[in-house]
């Protein structure tokens, strides 16, 4: 049995983080080098148990392959990491396509843009809005950096995709022939939000994820991530 298949398991019992505040205190931070193994474990476990796609080459998601000018946000409990997402800056369309591993047919006004990728949630903690919350932080970082847009790839028809559309994200179907994530039963979408929609998206996200914003107080992490990415643009 391959290591990736070994990571697959029966559907775990879902943990409601917001109803178990004392058992599962949450923290938000930017992952440091000492957390690479934890992030790799979470990514591999989450992708091995994904519903809508397969990952033929698990090495593509390892932290050592992340761009040096990227930041990796992590939400942790006392015991382990619950969710993570990477933010990297693409100076132009070719840069975005390298990060997204697929087509990014967007006008030059979208660049430089924040590419949100490598999102992973421990299956036990799915359904708590953690990834939607992290995506909203990605938009907030893009806004502080005065970028042209935020970009990502999503699977069509999922609740997360619907939530992004409600928060002002636009989408178009893309080819998956060169993606590391192979489409399963639903089309893949390039989702993007321009700077003119950042403020509206932020307002909606704060309402949708009010409990997580109140508990995790993300403003210092947003500022820190924006400062790091801004330096990479200089």
Image (cartoon, rainbow, N blue to C red):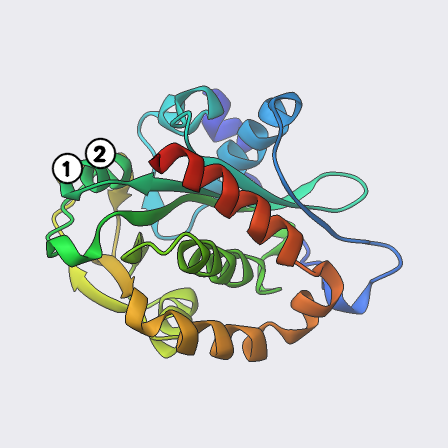
Element on which disc 1 rests: helix
Q: Position of residue 16 (x, y in %)?
A: 72, 64
Q: Is residue 1 visible?
A: no
Residue under the image location 27 percent in, 65 percent down: 194
For marks 1 and 2, give the CA distance. 6 Å
Dots 1, 2 in contact, CB < 8 A: yes
Q: Is residue 70 above or below residue 187?
A: above
SS state under label 2: helix
User: On the image, numbered disc 1 is attached to which residue?
Assistant: 94
Q: Residue at x 31, y 65 (%)?
A: 195
Whole-percent x and y of residue 15? Answer: 71, 58
Q: Residue at x 28, y 36 (%)?
A: 99
Residue 32 appears anywhere in the view: yes
Residue 69, image quadrant: top left
- Residue 22: percent from left, percent from top: 89, 59
Q: Identify the disc placed on residue 98.
A: 2
């Amino acid at each position: 049995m391959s290591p990736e298949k070994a990571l697959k398991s029966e559907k775990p019992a879902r943990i409601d983080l917001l109803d178990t505040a004392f058992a599962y205190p949450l923290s938000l931070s930017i992952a440091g080098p000492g957390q690479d193994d934890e992030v790799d474990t979470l990514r591999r476990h989450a992708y091995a148990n994904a519903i809508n796609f397969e990952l033929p080459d698990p090495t593509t998601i390892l932290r050592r392959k992340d761009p040096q000018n990227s930041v990796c946000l992590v939400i942790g409990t006392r015991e382990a990491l619950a969710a993570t997402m990477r933010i990297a800056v693409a100076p132009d369309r070719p840069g975005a396509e390298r990060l997204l591993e697929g087509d990014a047919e967007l006008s030059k006004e979208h660049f430089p843009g924040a590419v949100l990728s490598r999102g992973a949630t421990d299956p036990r903690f799915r359904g708590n809005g953690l990834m939607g919350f992290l995506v909203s932080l990605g938009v907030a970082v893009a806004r502080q950096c005065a970028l042209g847009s935020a970009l990502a790839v999503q699977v069509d028809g999922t609740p997360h995709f619907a939530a992004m559309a409600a928060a002002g994200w636009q989408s178009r179907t893309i080819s998956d022939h060169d993606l590391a994530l192979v489409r399963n039963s639903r089309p893949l979408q390039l989702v993007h939000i321009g700077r003119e929609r950042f403020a509206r998206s932020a307002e909606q996200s704060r309402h949708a994820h009010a409990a997580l914003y109140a508990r995790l107080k993300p403003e210092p992490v947003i500022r820190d991530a924006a400062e790091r990415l801004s330096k990479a643009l200089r």
